[in-house]
Amino acid sequence: MSGSTYGTLFSITTWGESHGPAVGVVIDGCPAGLPLTEDDIQKYLDRRKPGQNKFTTKRAESDKASILSGVFEGKTTGTPISIMVHNTDHRSRDYGKIKNCYRPGHADYTFDAKYGFRDYRGGGRSSGRETIGRAAAGAVAAKLLFELGIRVTAYTKAIGSICIDSSEYHYDEIMENALYMPNNYYAEKASEYLDSCMKNLDSSGGIIECVVTGLPAGIGEPVFKKLDACLSKAVMSIGAVKGVEIGDGFQAAEAFGSINNDSFGVNGGKIFKESNHSGGILGGISDGSPVILRAAIKPTPSIGQEQNTVTSALENTAITITGRHDPVIVPRAVVVVEAMTALTILDLLMVNMSSKVSSLKNFYKN
């Protein structure tokens, strides 16, 4: 299987299966000298681990991170950083009755069509558990970005049809509710909505928004490695994501150019934009404004209702999925969107070091 590596200079390779002994990530290209501990990584893993509340799967995993290489005396060495998390509460027997059935909404059929084989125990590599490696690597990238004055913040903007307008954001409330919404009132409404979904043996989707502040203008490679193109690819690689938009996104299709254009001004000798419909990116390159992206997350495909499907022997059948599953993926995916954004921003920052001769002169002569 190819495609498990992401990044150019700061690259990651995730490994492991949902019901295997462990999952993890190898980070290549992290500069030496970054203070890093397992606690730094654990903060990110704790935001996506199961069993946090009634809206997450009851799979009881501690998701304890272990750094196996690349760190010595509390700092990165410049060599590959390997991080491992053991799987301790996987119950493969939960999948025994449906091992020959293609679950609707899952990757069972497509994996079988591609490889002639699939790991039916929770989906193997297609499981959301693969994102542990992304979150762990994102923790490292975010810490390095913070050293550069750049901050990446993701949160739940919507659950189902319950959506928070940006004028009602209270960022200090994001960590105060189980859904990671920047408004506790809306989080309560969304919780009631999810309660009804669970009673109906159904699930819900939602929207995650991510904001990058402190990013200077000039980041992103024109044509095929535009900043927005790279961010879209990174976030779309998350299994549950079905759409990504930057700035006004699809609303821009309904706008006039006179409204959608962000007028420029000068203040204190610095260029600024009077609005940010572009989401901080022009021509695939950062413009110095906050970068704003949103990801549409599909409803959890594993639901308790009976569903029609077929078997690998091409027989029609119906299945009822049992086991431990999230009624909504969105809250646990927030940190994964944040991680993939941080990884992309950091990688493009490092690539940007070679865009000007002056950058090389400043680095090597000074």
Image (cartoon, rainbow, N blue to C red):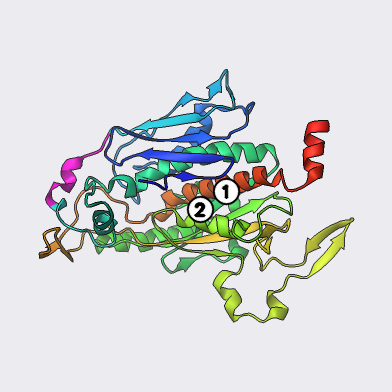
The residue that appears at 52% across and 29% down in the rendered structure is 80
Q: Residue at x 44, y 58 (%)?
A: 188
Horizontal side of 337 relative to 1 (left or right) equals right
Locate residue 167, reporting x and y percent.
62, 65
The three-letter amino acid code for the residue at tag 1 is Thr
Quadrant assignment for the C terminus: top right
**In which image quadrant can residue 106 be found?**
bottom left
Residue 90 counted in the magenta span: yes
Q: Which segment is the magenta one? A: 89-97
Q: Secondary structure at mark 1?
A: helix
Please indicate whether residue 231 sits to the left or right of residue 299 in the image. right
* Residue 86, position as x, y percentages in the image: 34, 31
Q: Residues within 10 Å of mark 1 (few under 14, many from 20)?
A: many
- Name the residue beneath numbered marker 1: 344
Q: Which residue is mark 2?
A: 234
User: What's under tag 2, amino acid-wise?
Assistant: Ala
Q: Main secondary structure of the magenta part?
A: helix
Q: Judge the density around disc 2: few (<14), some (14-19), many (≥20) Cα neighbours within 10 Å.
A: many
Q: Secondary structure at mark 2?
A: helix
Which numbered disc covers residue 191?
none
